[in-house]
Amino acid sequence: CTGGRKSHRHTVPLIISAHHHRTLTFVFPSAVCGPSIDIGNDISEFRRLENCTVVEGYLQILLIGDKNNNNINQEVFRSLSFPKLTMITDYLLLFRVSGLDSLSALFPNLTVIRGQKLFYNYALVIFEMTSLKDIGLFNLRNITRGAIRIEKNPELCYLDSIDWSLIMDAEFNNYIAGNKQSKECSDVCPGIMENSPQCRKTMFNDNYNYRCWNSNHCQKGKLNATHGRSSWTLLPETLTSQTMKHTFSRYTCQDGEVTETDALKVSSSHLMLTIHFHCKH
């Protein structure tokens, strides 16, 4: 297939737990791309990510543009978006991509980096990105295996506002150095300026702070967090907790109302969703 893209129809079991154990099966088209994707030297290479839901393997984006002339690249990057991409099974690496100031538009629904194979023990590497101002992966909920390395990004802020322990278990192995100094950043989480903070506060690295990816997006917790998740968009991208609640009401609650979704996570089979819920009659 062109660009290493493989189209499949995946069967996704939704394992239901309420008054009785039941299973619903959804079949949907998705594009699993790979094995692995290297995007380098030319922005046009990003076309290889079109329609990808999962990158099977790693995704490396590197050596794009002239670091002394960012204007053209910035305009192009702002028009690029791959909202269907929700998972990378190995690692994500970005190196010397000129003009890219945030990943928020590029990968707005990237949810999981599994880290099955790592880049020198790292699942996320952001290195010498001269234009990057914030990471912006606001839907990233889980780095399953491996640490992160964020180094030598001279404009990069919103690092102190991220609690990596919310999305990974190996945060003590993280390496973050050589980025813009915290005192030179003006990190403001959503609602702070209006005296109405929207983001949670946590303690991380001896810093009790509001948690956000940038001024527009709070940081969310792991996929298996248990309460207060009413607008998750996972695999497939059109299957949200709202549509699931409607489905549960029709097929498992005998037209009762689903009152609470207890857990939603990506299992070892990366296209399986597991949901536990309550019914109200």
Image (cartoon, rainbow, N blue to C red):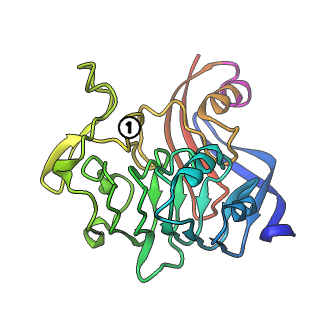
Residue 6, position in %: x, y? 82, 66
Residue on which the image places disc 1:
218
Q: Nearer the viewer, residue 233 or 137?
A: 137
Locate residue 151 relative to residue 103 in the image: left or right: left
| x 71%, y 76%: residue | 35
| x 46%, y 51%: residue | 101
Q: Quadrant of the C terminus?
A: top right
Residue type, numbered disc 1: Cys
Pick out the residue farthest to the right.
1
Part of the protein shown in magenta: 247-255
| x 27%, y 19%: residue | 194
Q: Quadrant of the N terminus?
A: bottom right
Residue 153, position in %: x, y? 35, 63
- Image height of 177 relative to 234, above or below: below
Answer with the quarter of the image where residue 26 lies. top right
Residue 55, position in %: x, y? 66, 65
Residue 243, position in %: x, y? 67, 30
Pick out the residue farthest to the front.
68
Asked which secondary structure carries label 1, the reply is loop
Q: Nearer the viewer, residue 12 or 159?
A: 159
- Image height of 78 relative to 215, above or below: below
Pick out the residue farthest to the bottom.
120
- Image height of 120 relative to 18, above or below: below
| x 83%, y 60%: residue | 8
Pick out the residue farthest to the left.
206
Locate residue 41 relative to residue 197 in the image: left or right: right
Q: Is residue 89 magenta?
A: no
How many marks can you see?
A: 1
Q: Residues within 10 Å of mark 1 (few under 14, many from 20)?
A: many
